[in-house]
Amino acid sequence: MNNPLLQSFDLAPFSKIQSEHFLPAIKNAIAIAKKEIDAIVTNTETPTFDNTIEKLEYSGELLDRVTSIFFNLNSAETNDQIQKIAQEASPLLSEFSNDISLNTALFKKIEEVYTQKDILSLTPEQSTLLDKRYKSFSRNGANLPDDKKEQLREIDKELAKLSLTFGENILTETNAFEMLLTDIADLSGLPDGAIEAAKALAESKEKEGWLITLDYPSYIPFMTYADNRELRKKLSLAFGARGFNANEQDNQDIVLKIATLRYKRAQLLGYTSHAHYVLEERMAQTPEKVVDFLTTILKKAKPAAEREFKQLENFAKELDGIDQLQKWDGSYYSEKLKQKLFNLDDEKLKPYFKLENVISGVFEVASALFGLRFLETDKIDTYHEEVKTYEVTDQDGTFISFFYADFHPRAGKRNGAWMTSYKSQMRKDGKNIRPHVSIVCNFTKPTPSKPSLLTFNEVTTLFHEFGHALHGMLANTTYPGLSGTSVYWDFVELPSQILENWCYEKEALALFAKHYETGEIIPIELIEKIKESATFMEGMATLRQLSFGLLDIAWHEKDPSGIKDVKLYEKEAFAGTSLYPDVASTCMSTAFSHIFQGGYSAGYYSYKWAEVLDADAFEYFKEQGIFNTEVAAKFKDHVLSKGGTENPMTLYKRFRGQEPKPEALLKRAGLI
């Protein structure tokens, strides 16, 4: 009992946990969860909602908590030992998941309750839970004969290991690349902050000069501002070739194996493809509808994207005599053109976006909309000294949630930004158990002379992830499996994407966009320029997002077993959305973590789908006032607090009074 993960705890006991605690804790928690399942199966009473569905829903609580801590560390603070444990633990967890979903006796009990659903007096939430539980069994092989159940187990174990290896390979290749510059001339064009950060990074590794890496805070400024085209090319090629280097970290075979195993799994379960299987439980419902949705927007966006690309080409030729615009030129000349057209660049904006001020700002927006209060505290245990922690209450001081925030890149942290949870909200034994929520980002670090100053893109990223966090914090449901972000994947991005809109509004910016040295509020002309430039190159940005969605569907809507060449297949999928010349040595699929490591397989379209929802929803706020408390209360009551308790379209219409219209998005993007 000296394993802290197996002792009673509320807050995650990070400082007490050693890596070697995880595997025994996971095995122990699986054993406890199995006993809880056995108790349901061996119960001789007639199956009811209470003794079967509800008991199943509350089972495995310890396992959920241990694994949420473990897998977040594997993303945010990993090491060789944790990665090795993940490779051992994933098949065990996959096996346990199959033990439940393929348990015939348990499924019979669930089925018995399900057949009576029309005569049971269930609340909408209970009815949703019963549907979800029944489908989770029927959709995951409960009706299969024993030999096919065994095949399913093997596929799931293999998939769990492959997706982990995929992610480990990307992290290894990201960390392995370093571009050490020793001539100050090679840094021409870079902002002072980026130069200082590169110097500090080199010093931290006991090297002379300036170090550029593939981590976003290093990579993006270099691609955006560095005048040296050859060095931009070198960096771009390294980034684009991750997982595609014909070495130990090559992901090509893994991509083919994952796609093929997902297809076999779907076929085994009676579905045409993995996309058909996934989308049955999404708002979009079918791959045909997804492709139709993406191509409808593509028809509107492509002419604008082609015009923008031509404009960029002409500008680069006029400025530097560039005959053929390449992928490593896009960000650089876009930024130059933006500066010319709007006299606006991130270096003008960054002094107004000190990280601490932006954090205060997002808290103030949440306070104005939802009456929340955030109190920073050092009494909460963390896994790294950089993690900030807060106690969240309502205006009356009632406890709402604990909140963790981890903002800067480290060697053991994967790129990108995400929200996660260490404890789900639920009602149990007469108590409303409140959630523990976390966001993880990779923002520019402070330097010896400057605090962490965010690019405008980083500001919107922080608001985005905080929108997900609000979905988790304000959850107010009975069952953990329907709480917070446990919603359809094409609905989950609505709370995150809608919050980004406040970053463009004068009233919101006035709360936090203050010069880090003078305290001056961001001038109105800069706010106007931010708004004016919001649709700059939007056609190209839309085309890029659509290309990722179409690539995802291409991997998952049909039998991939005939695909022999990952790069060639990807090139064909990109044919209708390509603007830049293809680069033979790079490949998107081999580093497409969203779909081959994360949970977005056959679901990447949902970012664009949720943009339709968020544009339509924010139009409602704009009509009534962006801090209108009545509209905010409706959004909280019908979207944020309700989780997955009802069909998302039902919840959305209850908030908005109508179905979403894509015109709001197209108008906002300047495409109509």
Image (cartoon, grey):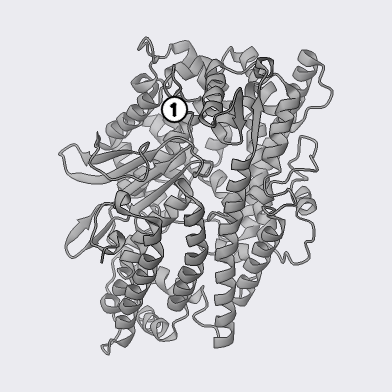
Q: Position of residue 634 (x, y in %)?
A: 31, 43
Q: Is residue 103 above or below residue 542?
A: below
Q: Is residue 503 left or right of residue 290?
A: left
Identified by mark 1, the residue type is Cys
Farthest-out residue, right: 323
Q: Which residue is mark 1?
A: 503
Q: Is residue 494 visible?
A: yes
Q: Is residue 225 left or right of residue 522?
A: right
Q: Nearer the viewer, residue 265 or 225?
A: 225
Residue at position x 27%, y 53% in the image: 476
Residue at position x 57%, y 53% in the image: 168
Q: How many marks?
A: 1
Q: Position of residue 292 (x, y in %)?
A: 66, 52
> Are there few (<14), some (14-19), or many (20+) residues within 10 Å of tag 1?
many
Residue at position x 32%, y 74% in the image: 32
Q: Nearer the viewer, residue 23 or 155?
A: 23
Q: Quadrant of the C terminus?
A: top right
Residue at position x 43%, y 22% in the image: 353
